[in-house]
Amino acid sequence: MAKSKGKGDGDEILEEVNKMHDVDTTKYVIHANITAEGFVEKSDVVGAIFGQTEGLLGEELDLRDLQKSSRIGRIEVNVESKGGKSRGEILIPSGLDKVETAILAASLETIDRVGPCIAQVNVTTMEDIRATKRKRITDRAKQLMHEVVERGIDSEMMVNEVKQAVRMEEITQYKGLPAGPNVESSDAILVVEGRADVLNLLKYGIKNTIAVEGTNISPVINKLSKRKTVTALVDGDRGGDLILKELLQIADVDYIATVPEGRSVEDMAYKEITKALHNKAPVEQQEYGKEKKEQEKVPRRVIQRKKVKEEKEEKAPIPNPFKTQLEELEGTFKARLLDKEKNVLKETTVRDLAKELKETDENANCVVFDGVITQRIVDIAKEKNLEYVVGLKVGDVVKMPASLKILTSESA
C-alpha cells in the first residue's frame, strides 16, 4: 500500500500535487483511505468516485464539470490488493473554497461499492496547500538564516581577517629575527621587542621593523645600526626599560619613541603608534643618553616627567623663513624649488613633485609645496642634499634626517 501522507509530510504532498492537473489553482488536497472486499484497480476506484457522487451535490459541485473547468484537478489513486482485499489512498486537488472542498470531501464517504466489491471510504484530512507551502518557506528560511549565521562575518571581522592574512604574508626573517619586508631596503628602521609588535606595525603599513626577541640582543641589530637610522620603540614597562638600556649599550640608536607607561606596542592603535613616532626624540635629548647610571636609580615615570618639562623649556618655535612662499602656494596644489637666495628655480604641481625633485639638476636648497610632507619627499630631499622641506603639515614620516629642516605652516 502506498505510504499515507499526513500534515507532516509537506514535501511529499507538494510533490504529489505537482504531478496533478492545474497545480496553480490548487488550494486544498483531500486525503482519503479506501478499503474494498476483493480485487479492485485504480480505474475502478476513479469510476466509483465519479459514478456514485454524480447528481449528489447538484450541478455546481458535479465532479465532471468541476474537472472540466479546472476547479478540481486529476484524481490520484494508489491501491494494492493482498489476501483478497484491496487498500489504498485517494488524493483530490481542489481549487474550490474551504466550505465547498469540505462538502466534496464528505461526499466521498457515501461511496459503498467499487465495481462488484463492497467498499468503504474514510476522509483522513483536507490539506491546506498554502499552509504547507508557508511552512516549507518558513523552514527553509530558518535553514538559510542558520547557514548565514554560521558562515557569515561582519565587516570588521572581514577587515581583520584580510589584514591578518596580509600581515602573515609580509612578515619575514632578517638573519633569524622577525622583521618587516623593508628592513634591508629602508634607510631607517624601527627596533621593537617581539614578533607580535612587528605584526601589529605591519597591520598599519609600517614595514621597516625588526624585533630583538628578548634582552639577549643579536649582533645583527648592531650591524644594522651602523648603516641605518634606528628608532627604538619598546613597551612602556620594566621589560621595555631593560631592553632599551641594553640596546643603547650595544647599538647605535638615533631616536627613542616613548610608549605610554603600561602600554604594549603589539596592542597599540594606529593613532597611538603614529603619535609615538611623531614625538620621537634624538637619543642625545633623552636621559638615557646622558646619565645611564643615575637613570637606573630613577623610576621611568620620573624620567618621563622630567623629559617633558625640559622639552617645554628648551624647545623654541622654529622660524619659518619661507612662510610667505607657503602662503602664496596655499590652495594651488603647486610646489617650488628654491635656491639658497630663495629664488624660484622651478615650479611644478604637487602630484609631480617627487618626480621633478628626483630629476632636478638645479642647485636647489629648498622645496616649498602646498601639501603634506611624506617620507618619500623627505628621502628624496635628503638624497638631493636639500636644507629645507616646507609643507602644510608633516604626515607619517618615520625617518627625520638630522641634516634636513622640516617646516610647516604652524612654524613661527
Image (cartoon, rainbow, N blue to C red):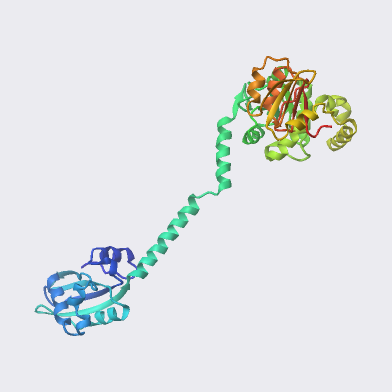
Q: Residue furthest right?
A: 313
Whole-percent x and y of residue 376?
A: 67, 26
- Residue at image location 44% in from the left, 56% down from the top: 144
> Would residue 355 appear left or right of 71 to someone viewing this image?
right
Q: Nearer the viewer, residue 296 or 27?
A: 27
- Residue at image location 80% in from the left, 34% down from the top: 410
- Residue at image location 13% in from the left, 79% down from the top: 51
Q: Is residue 260 above or below residue 124?
A: above
Q: Nearer the viewer, residue 156 or 394?
A: 394
Residue 86 location, quadrant? bottom left
Whole-percent x and y of residue 9?
A: 32, 66
Q: Residue furthest left?
A: 116
Residue 240 location, quadrant? top right
The quarter in which the C terminus is drawn is top right
Residue 399 location, quadrant? top right
Q: Nearer the viewer, residue 1 or 83?
A: 1
Answer whether residue 168 is visible to the viewer in this image.
Answer: yes
Q: Is residue 220 above or below residue 136?
A: above
> Would residue 22 appear left or right of 40 to someone viewing this image?
right
Answer whether residue 217 is visible to the viewer in this image.
Answer: no
The quarter in which the N terminus is drawn is bottom left
Q: Is residue 56 above or below residue 307?
A: below
Whole-percent x and y of residue 223?
A: 70, 17
> Would residue 202 appear left or right of 150 to someone viewing this image?
right
Whole-percent x and y of residue 211?
A: 67, 28
How many numbered discs? 0
